[in-house]
């Protein structure tokens, strides 16, 4: 951790003030209606001081903490995806006047935004969205315009939830590349270790009341990371995971989970990396105004796989399998990484309490059990019998006897005549 500094808790107000002074609209965690959500922050008092959360399959509750931790919760209920990739976005508007018509492309809102408190899993998800929407042949112009004016203040996760497994996916709990500033909240005494990750972060840090970090601060930050890794609520075994899912498309586990899945699309809506969309065309009652919107869609809907003649995935089980195998298998071929960051939101916000890590583990266990049964049915491999050694029929030859007619020898009796 080179060039780290220490920011006192009172310095958070200076950080937020510096961001707003630079023209940023600041979004960060806030406690609203019984959940910690991403919302506009005007001052440090808006942040959830002393508030934690508990998460389990199909379960979310906020809880009071016994300290004044500002970021002492697992993650906001929704990810920053909706800020950069809105669930409903106007693409163009058409107007009809008499016999003529015009089409006006919609310009995306490009006001600078600072995201404060971004967790490592969500930071990794933003990087994945960048690859999908910016890194391919056709750049998403609306996403690019928003992304260009975003400053990211990431926070090391010290208190993972019961559904978190970012350590399994290699995306946390310490934020990786991509943040402008990284904060690690340290206890006893309460303070923040701050590290700049970009030129914008360094310029921001220069305006804050910071002190030089000492070795004890760095050691405390390492302890926070180690404690978070040990406290992960879930584990996902990623050993040959793409191959496992590819080879077990017919696993009976898919049918079992399909009986519980409601196909409600909660998992894809809260997922920070899902990017499937559809197009919605609307008009007013006069027929003079038409609009085209891009809206989030989900592979869990029946209509999503519709082509001429009908939908290709009519069973809920096949839709869950499509989602899981695309996320954990096909993403590697398309984008050179997994499509899952281990945030656990798909588990927490599933009304049926379906646990992705448990379903993958069940597929693996069934595959291993099948291999054991197959090996038992086949039985041990029988040894190949070795023919007994017999006297050689060829003078001067000491190996096994040749079968079939003997070949003639030369007058010298030693070499075989070439056929």
Image (cartoon, helix red, strand yellow):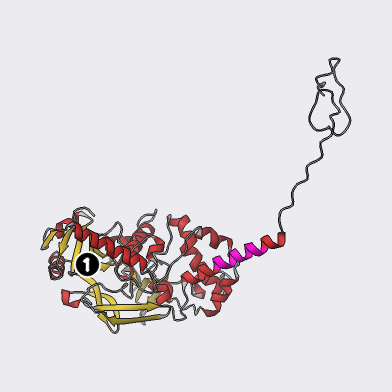
Estimate the x, y position of residue 6 in percent, counting from the top left: 16, 62
Q: Is residue 52 left or right of residue 213?
A: right
Which residue does the image show at 51% across and 78% down from the upper left?
261
Position of the C terminus, as image quadrant, is: top right
> Which span is picked out in magenta?
363-373
Residue 367 drawn in magenta: yes
Please state which of residues 246 and 407 is positioned toward the viewer in this rendering: 407
Vertical relation: 215 (above or below) 293: above
User: Would you name the residue on which mark 1 appears?
Assistant: 186
Please state which of residues 370 and 76 is positioned toward the viewer in this rendering: 370
Choose top left, top right, bottom left or bottom right for residue 102.
Answer: bottom left
Vertical relation: 279 (above or below) 403: below
Residue 248 drawn in magenta: no
Instruction: Name the residue at the right extreme.
Output: 405
Position of the N terminus, as image quadrant, is: bottom left
Please state which of residues 312 and 330 is positioned toward the viewer in this rendering: 330
């Amino acid at each position: 951790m080179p060039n780290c500094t220490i920011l006192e808790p009172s310095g958070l107000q200076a950080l937020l003030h510096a961001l707003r002074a630079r023209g940023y609209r600041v979004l960060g965690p806030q406690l609203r209606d019984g959940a910690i959500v991403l919302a506009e922050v005007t001052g440090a008092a808006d942040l959830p001081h002393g508030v934690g959360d508990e998460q389990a399959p199909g379960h979310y509750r906020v809880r009071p903490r016994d300290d004044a931790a500002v970021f002492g919760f697992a993650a906001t209920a929704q990810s920053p995806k909706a800020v950069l990739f809105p669930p409903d976005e106007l693409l163009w508007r058409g107007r009809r006047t008499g016999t003529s018509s015009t089409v006006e492309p919609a310009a995306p809102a490009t006001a600078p935004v600072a995201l404060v408190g971004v967790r490592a899993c969500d930071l990794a998800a933003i990087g994945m969205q960048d690859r999908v929407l910016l890194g391919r042949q056709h750049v998403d112009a609306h996403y690019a315009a928003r992304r260009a004016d975003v400053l990211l203040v990431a926070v090391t996760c010290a208190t993972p939830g019961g559904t978190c497994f970012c350590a399994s996916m290699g995306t946390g709990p310490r934020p990786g590349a991509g943040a402008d500033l990284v904060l690690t909240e340290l206890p006893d005494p309460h303070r923040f270790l701050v590290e700049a990750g970009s030129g914008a972060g360094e310029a921001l840090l220069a305006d804050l009341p910071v002190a030089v970090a000492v070795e004890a601060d760095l050691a405390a930050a390492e302890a926070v990371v180690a404690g978070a890794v040990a406290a992960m609520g879930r584990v996902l075994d990623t050993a040959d995971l793409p191959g496992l899912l590819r080879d077990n498309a017919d696993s009976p586990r898919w049918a079992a989970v399909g009986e519980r899945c409601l196909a409600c699309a909660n998992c894809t809506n809260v997922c920070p990396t899902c990017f499937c969309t559809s197009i919605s065309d609307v008009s007013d009652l006069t027929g003079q105004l038409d609009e085209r919107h891009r809206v989030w869609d989900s592979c869990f809907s029946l209509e999503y796989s519709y082509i001429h003649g009908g939908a290709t995935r009519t069973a809920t089980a096949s839709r869950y399998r499509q989602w899981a195998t695309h996320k954990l298998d096909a993403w590697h071929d398309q984008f050179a990484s997994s499509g899952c960051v281990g945030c656990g939101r798909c588990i927490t916000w599933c009304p049926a309490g379906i646990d992705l890590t448990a379903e993958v583990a069940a597929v693996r266990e069934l595959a291993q059990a099948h291999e054991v049964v197959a090996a038992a049915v086949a039985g041990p491999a029988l040894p190949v019998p070795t023919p007994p050694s017999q006297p050689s029929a060829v003078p001067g030859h000491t190996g096994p006897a040749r079968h079939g007619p003997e070949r003639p020898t030369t007058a010298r009796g030693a070499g075989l005549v070439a056929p």
